[in-house]
Image: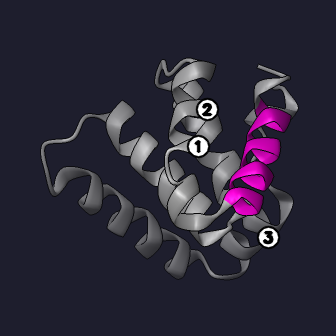
Amino acid sequence: MTDNDKIPHTFEVFNERFPGLSHAHQQVGAALDEAGPLDEKTRTLVKIGICVGAGLESAVKSHVRRGLKSGLSAEEIEHALVLGMNSVGFPRTVAAWQWARQVLKDA
């Protein structure tokens, strides 16, 4: 298992401490995935964009990892990262690009 495959320790500890919440979170995620016609790759690109806009480092990294596993290329992921630059700003976009590169460099 590479560092890119590892679930963050804090997430693991939270799930152990609150298993019911973890299970509910997973169920909501599955329901959201099934709520519409988008395929896995498209959903992942959308989630990357949302996480960039919200400035969520851990979530950006998580969805980049998931994107790579679903067959997205680094170029597709980078495109999703930069699409919102005019909306969320240059600094936030560059920060998210840096977070993604930390995952992509080890892929």
Q: What's the distance in space between the residues labelled 3 and 1, CA to CA?
A: 32 Å
Q: Describe the element under mark 2 as helix, strand or loop.
A: helix
Of label 3 and label 1, which has the lower sequence position? 3
Which amino acid type corresponds to the residue marked 3 in the rendered image?
Val
Q: Describe the element under mark 3 as helix, strand or loop.
A: helix
The dot on residue 78 is: 2
Q: Position of residue 23 (x, y in %)?
A: 47, 69
Q: Position of residue 86 (x, y in %)?
A: 53, 58
Which amino acid type corresponds to the residue marked 1 in the rendered image?
Val
The dot on residue 67 is: none
Q: Describe the element under mark 1 as helix, strand or loop.
A: helix
**Circle 1 sits on which residue?**
82
| Front-most of residues 97 and 57 | 97
Q: What's the distance in space between the residues labelled 3 and 2, CA to CA?
A: 30 Å
Which image quarter is the C terminus in? Answer: top right
Colour convention of the picture = one colour
Circle nearer the viewer, 3 or 1: 1
Q: How crowded is mark 1: few (under 14 residues within 10 Å), some or many (20 or more)?
A: some
| Front-most of residues 76 and 61 | 76
Q: What's the distance in space between the residues labelled 2 and 1, CA to CA?
A: 6 Å
Is the residue 57 above or below the residue 24 in the image?
above
In the rendered structure, the answer to whether residue 32 lies left or right of residue 88 reads: left
Is the residue 68 above or below the residue 63 in the image?
above
| Front-most of residues 89 and 38 | 89
Magenta segment, which residues? 90-103
Residue under the image location 82 percent in, 43 percent down: 98
Q: Do the residues labelled 2 and 1 touch (CB within 8 Å)?
A: yes
**Circle 3 sits on which residue?**
13
Q: Where is residue 43 in the image (x, y as percent from the top left)?
A: 35, 44
In the rendered structure, the answer to whether residue 48 lies left or right of residue 78 reads: left
Circle nearer the viewer, 2 or 1: 1
Q: Is residue 53 magenta?
A: no
